[in-house]
Amino acid sequence: MKFNTVLIATVILVVTCFISLPCQPVQALGDVQIVSHSSFYNSLDTLYVVGELENTGDVATEFTKVTATFYGSDNQVIDTSIGYSTLDVLLPGRKSPFAVMLLQDDGAMDVYNYTLSVSWQEYDEDKPIGLEILSSEESVDVLDCLHITGEIKNTADSNANSVMVCATFYDSTGTVVGRSWEYADPSDMAPNQTGTFDVQLIYEEQIEKVASYSLSAESEEYSVIPEFPTGLTMIVAIASIAVAVAIYKNKLKD
């Protein structure tokens, strides 16, 4: 009986000690990762590195910067260049495209490979959802530029200023091959007001690689309801029509 009393007292003492220990709060941190990236040259021999960032942390980030270091075939550094997340504020769990470029005069044509690193600052304020992309569709103009057009709405209770829509373009493997952005029309939208957007990808060599795209948007005050990648049905349709026309012309020649 005496042993049981001592045992019970010991258990109570241990439990009391654990309860009285101060709880260490979990520190919320931003953590931005590069999801994918690729590179290409434009007609002016400017080297572009395009890709997508994802905030896998617990807090939003801002001034999210990508630094590219370019190397020659001898593994010597040619130059460094920086680019930023297209979205000014990258919320937890959200993605944003980025682009870094190196001009021909800075040694773009001598680049053999490159490395990327990411840095950011934590965004302490709140950026609530207040924008919704209502629709989008794709088309190709007479200059072979790819257009993503659609409607966006301010669903918040106050004005949304400097509304911007950005598009991330992927190839069939899900690798980013392009990005572009444009302000909505109008760029300043009252509550419940709807605007339009037209985001263009102008590089022909990259348009040929595009299999899908995703859209995001933000204003100075609000973020957008996240979207999933969308397949380029219009491009497929246009390609099918072109093939059909070619076959028909060949039959006429025969």
Image (cartoon, rainbow, N blue to C red):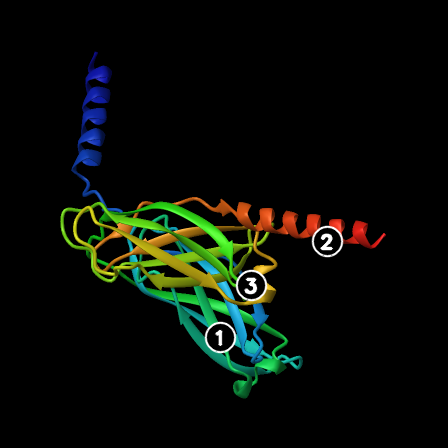
**From what the image shows, is residue 83 above or below residue 9?**
below
In the figure, is residue 207 to the left or right of 95?
right
Q: Position of residue 36 (x, y in %)?
A: 52, 57
Return the mark for residue 144. 3
Going by the numbered disc 3, the residue's amino acid type is Asp
Give neighbour class at mark 2: few <14, some 14-19, many 20+ (Cα, 10 Å): few
Within 10 Å of disc 1 (Cα), the crowding (few <14, some 14-19, many 20+) is some
Q: Is residue 41 visible in this depiction of the protein? A: yes
- Of the numbered discs in the image, which one, if any, rests on residue 101? 1
Name of the residue lying farthest toward the front: 252
- Horizontal relation, residue 100 to residue 195: left or right: right
- Which mark, by number, is residue 246? 2
Evaluate whether residue 55 shows in this view: no
| Closest to the observer, 58 or 169 | 169
Helix, strand or loop at label 2? It is helix
**Image quadrant assignment for residue 186:** bottom left
In the rendered image, the quadrant that contains the N terminus is top left
User: What's the distance in space between the residues labelled 1 and 2, CA to CA?
Assistant: 38 Å
Q: Are marks 2 and 3 in contact (CB under 8 Å)?
A: no
Percent coordinates x, y for residue 250 in the rendering: 79, 53
Q: Nearer the viewer, residue 86 or 19?
A: 86
